[in-house]
Image (spheres, rainbow, N blue to C red):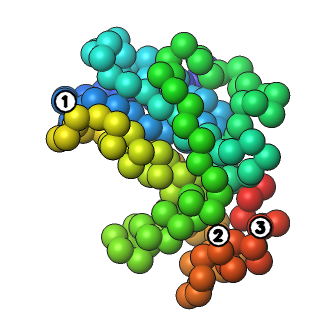
């Protein structure tokens, strides 16, 4: 409960203050604290705000995220806050993570990559010019020893590090 409350009391008000026309919020589906806390506050502020959770494909593991269809629903997660859970596979998450580093200089982790893949999909659904917030919850430092940021083909890298990266 403290996890969701922290995001309700701090993260969501910061989003509202900095981007008052936010149309949608995207977060990875991990403990459920972020998406629940931010989502509740944003929907109280503006019931039209859409809240989406980036969720790994069934059986596909992305570090820090979970698929609810596999049987475990975090106690803190309030499913009524979500407008939708949107699936993302680990390869697309890794590709986006690498793009962030290569193109934007943002050294994020794989759950951030997953959230951005979903945010881009959400942007395509909304009217042009809509504001979408995607939360970046992790840094790339955890993945340095895996080779996730090494030069080369992302598919080859993903297959060689699957045991380390997806846990």
Disc 3 versus disc 2: nearer the observer: 3
Element class at badge 1: loop
* Quadrant of the snapshot with the N terminus: top right
Residue highlighted by disc 1: 21
User: Image height check: is 57 above or below 51?
Assistant: below
Earlier in the chain: of badge 3 and badge 1, it is 1
Residue at 43% in and 27% down: 51
Q: Residue at x 65, y 74 (%)?
A: 155
Q: Nearer the viewer, residue 44 or 79?
A: 79
User: Circle 3 sits in a helix, a strand or a loop, which is it?
Assistant: helix
x and y, in percent, of residue 98 in the image: 50, 71
Residue behind mark 2:
143
Residue located beneath label 3 in the image: 162
Q: Is residue 127 above or below residue 92?
A: above
Which of disc 1 and disc 2 is earlier in sequence? Answer: 1
Between the residue at mark 3 and the residue at mark 2, the CA separation in whole angstroms equals: 12 Å
The local secondary structure at tag 2 comes to helix
Q: Place residue 140 in its image quadrant.
A: bottom right
How far apart marks 2 and 1 lie (CA) works out to: 35 Å
Q: Residue at x 73, y 25 (%)?
A: 73
Q: Do labels 3 and 1 touch, CB within 8 Å?
A: no
- Give the CA separation, mark 3 to mark 1: 39 Å
Query: How dense is the environment of label 3, judged by Cα within 10 Å: few (below 14), some, or many (20 and up)?
Result: some
Residue 144 showing in the rendered view: no
Tell me the residue at 60%/76% (across/down): 154
Residue 27, position in %: x, y? 49, 39
- When asked about the image quadrant of residue 18, the answer is top left
């Amino acid at each position: 409960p403290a996890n969701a409350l922290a995001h309700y009391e701090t993260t969501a008000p910061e989003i509202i203050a900095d981007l008052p026309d936010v149309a949608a919020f995207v977060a990875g589906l991990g403990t459920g604290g972020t998406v629940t806390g931010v989502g509740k506050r944003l929907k109280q502020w503006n019931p039209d705000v859409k809240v989406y959770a980036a969720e790994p494909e069934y059986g596909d593991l992305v570090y820090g995220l979970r698929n609810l269809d596999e049987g475990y629903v975090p106690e803190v997660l309030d499913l009524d806050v979500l407008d939708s859970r949107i699936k993302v596979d680990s390869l697309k998450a890794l590709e986006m993570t690498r793009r962030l580093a290569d193109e934007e200089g943002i050294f994020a982790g794989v759950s951030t990559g997953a959230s951005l893949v979903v945010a881009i999909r959400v942007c395509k659904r909304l009217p042009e010019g809509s504001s979408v917030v995607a939360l970046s919850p992790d840094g790339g430092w955890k993945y340095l020893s895996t080779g996730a940021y090494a030069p080369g083909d992302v598919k080859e890298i993903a297959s060689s590090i699957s045991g380390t990266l997806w846990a």
